[in-house]
Amino acid sequence: MRCIADPAAGFDHAVMKDWPEWLPREPAREDSFIRMRLGSRLVRDQSSWASAIISAGHAPRTRLAFLPASDAVRLMCLAAAWTGVPSLVGQLRNADVIAARSVLGEDAFAFAFHAALLPRPTAGLMSAIGASKLPTEPAELLHCGAAMFGLAMGCIPDALQVRLRLRSPASIWIMAANACRNDSAGEDAFHAMRRLVRNRMPLWSHWFD
């Protein structure tokens, strides 16, 4: 219901065009009344999609879209670390380690060393997320993690995609939304997400049963 009523929660300023000069950005983000009015402008003519969004919550794969945004981003970072294990665990230069920690977060970077013991993503999944030629830059790995998150959700209602594209940071949420489609690698992506949730975010494990 919050997804329907407050679509601008956690919005990224980068997606906002023609921001009114008289309205400070941070107060608008924090004030629920202003934010909900703003959200109604951003997703106008979307009220008829409420039932589609509610129905989407019945499918375990689509429930990924309803995770709290911060937990969803953490899950994308974990997926990025799992994807990039060979490059992350082989880093020797201090500058590279600092850069990876900065982009992926300390938790995901540490997870990469544990993930080295896990089965690798299938060739089909690596191809679907654009990682056939394994990326080495942390930002590229994060985009792969976001793509895996989107693939795991599968084809979701347009109104839900619109809401995902408003979230911060916009660059990875747009990547995730663009990957929301029916794909042969979708089930592999979802099983990977469930495995990551069970391993590092057990609080949400039952949510995808």
Image: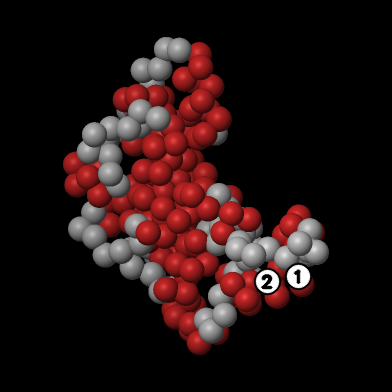
Q: Tell me the amino acid under the disc marked 1.
A: Ile
Spatial distance from mark 2 to mark 1, Cα to Cα?
Answer: 6 Å
**Which residue occupies the extreme bottom position in the image?**
48
Residue 173 at x, y = what percent?
A: 48, 54
Residue 150 x/y as whole percent: 38, 56
The reply to whether residue 50 is in sight is: no
Q: Amino acid at mark 2?
A: Leu
Residue at 41% x, 53% y: name it. Answer: 175
Q: Which mark is residue 206?
A: none
Quadrant of image for the N terminus: bottom right
Q: Residue at x 41, y 74 (%)?
A: 157
Q: Are marks 2 and 1 in contact (CB under 8 Å)?
A: yes
Give the residue number, with chain letter if any, for mark 1.
34
Specify the label residue 38 is tagged with.
Answer: 2
Q: Of 122 and 159, which appears nearest the observer?
A: 159
Q: Is residue 195 above or below residue 104?
A: below
Looking at the image, residue 89 lies above or below residue 196: above
Q: Residue at x 50, y 62 (%)?
A: 164
Tell me if mark 2 has few (under 14), some (14-19) or many (20+) residues whose alpha carbon lies within 10 angstroms of its own: some
Residue 105: in sight, yes or no? yes
Please say if 115 is above or below 29. Answer: above
The residue lying at 36 percent from left, 43 percent from top is 144
